[in-house]
Amino acid sequence: MFTGIIQRIGTIVDVKMHGAAGRITLAPNRPFDAPVHLGDSIAVNGACLTVAAIEGANFCFDVLKETFDKTNLGEKGQGSIVNLERALALGDTLGGHIVTGHVDGVGTVRRVDRVDRDWKFEINCAQNLLMLMVYKGSIALDGISLTVAELKDDAFVVHIIPHTMEETDMSEFKPGAKVNLEADILGKHVQRILEFGGGQNYRISFENKQ
């Protein structure tokens, strides 16, 4: 589990493909506060990956075809910038919101506007993702915990402060860029319950067994 508070920026130094799967090697911009070990989980642009090898200061991750297909990691190459967050440990501060590291889909940057000292990003995405968002609710964008500032028919808007621009990959965003999206887990649970009649079918089944 993660919080959407980006801890480091990584630069991809190598991508080796083995058929449709592959291995990504990246270099963090500075060491993490605590040592990283083999088998540790790190969210890379919001996708939970496992450290498969450590080469000096660099980390290697084996990436499945499914992950390449369903995230923007399939479009990343040598020199690409990615966001990094280590898995949440018991007792850590939950500074953003609950993020699982399971990307729900990919959105497209439609507009980037400067608003005084801040920035405004409009992201186009599929309806099945938009229906899980609420005004002022949380959304993970490339692993970053952000607040939905506006909801449109086929897009949503987030506002970014200078610190977020400096400490994440959002400074690289241009119209047409692909971004990983993970909807709030609470919204997904509510949707699932509603699909089953708001829990009514479960109650009927439970009562019939009594």
Image (cartoon, rainbow, N blue to C red):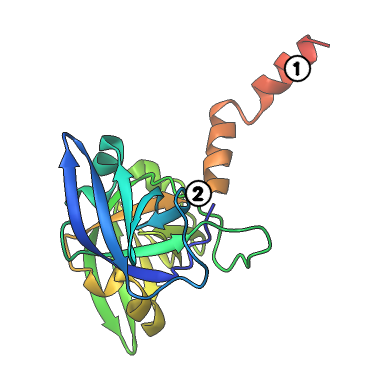
Residue 45's image quarter?
bottom left
Find residue 74 and report its horizontal and vertical position in percent.
21, 47
Name the residue nearer the viewer: 119 or 62.
62
| Res. 202 visible in picture | yes
**Location of mark 2 (residue):** 100
Query: Left of 17 or right of it: where is 126?
Result: right
Q: Please tell me which residue is depicted at 73% across the width and 22% down the height of the picture.
A: 203
Residue 148's image quarter?
bottom left
Q: Please tell me which residue is depicted at 39% across the width and 77% down the height of the picture.
A: 164
Amino acid at circle 1: Phe
Q: Please tell me which residue is depicted at 23% across the width and 68% down the height of the picture.
A: 173
User: Sequence order check: which comes first, mark 2 or mark 1?
Assistant: 2
Q: Please tell me which residue is depicted at 71% across the width and 14% down the height of the picture.
A: 205
Residue extending farthest top: 209
Amino acid at circle 2: Thr
Residue extending farthest front: 56
Label 1 residue SS: helix
Label drawn at residue 72: none
Find residue 145 and report its horizontal and vertical position in percent.
46, 64
Query: Left of 206 or right of it: where is 199?
Result: left
Label drawn at residue 206: 1
Find residue 90 and report its horizontal and vertical position in percent.
66, 58
